[in-house]
Amino acid sequence: MPGRTDMCPAEYAILREEIDMKATIDRVEGKTAVLLMGEDGKIKMNMPLVLLPVGCKEGEVLNISIERDPDATGQARERVSSLMEKLKKKEQGKTGIIQYPGT
């Protein structure tokens, strides 16, 4: 895709498997840092301070990398599917009749 001029950076990013970008810490509001992202800094993102490296301050530039994790995605899908099956079985077992112990 390099060299394409018909797409904005956000559209181009969708086509990549991994995204690397810069973010500037604009300000800190309580326990949250406001990051300005993208080449023009027009994308704002709130990030809990606990997720940032220790000692980060306003005005610092961070490297951010985002990539897919197919293995974790598959595991999450399996876990959700298993839970859904358990719920379906539990719902099928309900008769709507109140039963008392010993009856």
Image (spheres, rainbow, N blue to C red):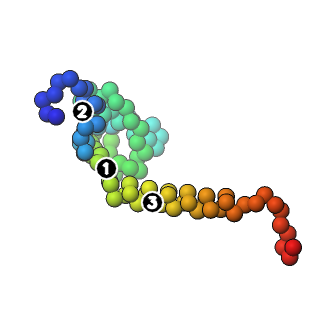
Q: Amino acid at mark 3?
A: Glu
Cβ atoms at labels 2 and 3 below 8 Å apart: no
In the depicted structure, whether residue 5 falls above or below residue 24: above
User: For the residues marked 2 and 3, what is the alpha-carbon distance in whole angstroms?
Assistant: 31 Å
Give the residue at the far bottom of this rendering. 102
Q: Which residue is depicted at the point 84% across and 73% down?
A: 101
How many numbered circles are shown? 3
Q: Looking at the image, which residue is at 28% across and 44% down?
A: 64
Classify 77 as above or below 32. below
First of labels 2, 1 by sequence position: 2
Secondary structure, mark 3, is helix
Q: What residue is disc 3 on?
A: 78
Residue 40 in picture, x, y percent from top left? 26, 26
The residue indicated by pointer 1 is: 68
| Marked residue nearer the N-terminal end (3 or 1) | 1
The label number, if any, that marks residue 12 in the structure image: 2
